[in-house]
Image (cartoon, grey):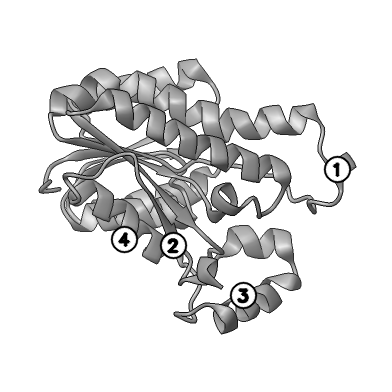
Amino acid sequence: MNLKDKVIMVTGSSSGVGAATVRLLASMGSHVVINYARSEEAVLKVAEECRALDVDVLVCQADVADDDACKNLVAQTLDKWGRIDGLVNNAGTTKFVSHNQLDGLDKDDFFHIYGVNVVGPYQMVRATESALRASGDASIVNVASIAGVRGVGSSIAYAASKGALLTLTQSLARILGPEIRVNAVCPGFITGEWLAQDMGENYEKVKSALEERAPLQVTCTPESVAESIVGFIEGHSIITGQQIILDGGMHLV
């Protein structure tokens, strides 16, 4: 897919992987929908950076766990451009709880995490399906995690939600072709503020340990994850229902 003048929606794109993705798409000529739940100041800065690349930008606040908000987000996009060519389900949440602390999670934690990480992507796909089919060569990329592959990560609830998102990816790929491809990326440790804020002093220790052990001796950056996301949108025209692990080969160790 030539990304020039295509319309791509990216949920959770005020920072991190989402922001890196809209910046990369804008640099390739795509018009982008930048979605956020709370960080208005951050999202306006990202929008300014994208507009500087001579593309149109739509900034929309929406909680993807809210079905009406998803429908409104899509309606605003169609009102502006009349088309949608791609969807990146990047919005996500977690609660940091050691896996051996079973009392650290309750059903409300699970419902909240699943609401954003699983139900949200489903609702966004449902809301965009008609427009994506009309595009004729559309792509959906779900941002999962190595946590969903190996049962690791910030909490059991988070790992379970990302595993569910991978199953959702396969189910949707089976029914949305041939007009829409559906794939997932599974990043490992991603450098940046999100992990740094929650991991505190352990952040650098874990980062260094992973980089030392991984075959490629690297961890993910938001930009490297964005490259793989955009790769699924721009190319890989024969691939659907697949997941790609992004961890510098750490899963091999």
Give the mark nearer the N terminus: 1 vs 2: 1
Q: Secondary structure at mark 1?
A: helix
Q: Which residue is mark 4?
A: 227
Q: Which residue is mark 3?
A: 207
The image quarter in which residue 58 lies: top left
Against 215, residue 196 (above or below) is: above
Question: Marks 3 and 4, Cα distance to the nearest angstrom?
Answer: 21 Å
Give x and y (percent) for residue 23: 31, 56
Question: Marks 4 and 2, Cα distance to the nearest angstrom?
Answer: 11 Å
Front: mark 4 or 2? 2
Give the mark nearer the N terminus: 3 vs 1: 1
The image quarter in which residue 146 lies: bottom right
Tell me, for residue 102, which label it has, or none.
1
Of residue 221 and residue 4, the one placed in the foreground of this image is: 221
Give x and y (percent) for residue 176: 27, 25
Regarding residue 235, the answer to whether it shows in the image is yes
**Amino acid, disc 3:** Lys
Question: Marks 4 and 1, Cα distance to the nearest angstrom?
Answer: 36 Å
Q: Which residue is mark 2?
A: 246
Give the mark nearer the N terminus: 4 vs 1: 1
**Amino acid, disc 4:** Glu
Q: Quadrant of the C terminus?
A: bottom right
Q: Is 52 situated left or right of 205 in this image? A: left
Residue name at image x 60 percent, y 38 percent: 161
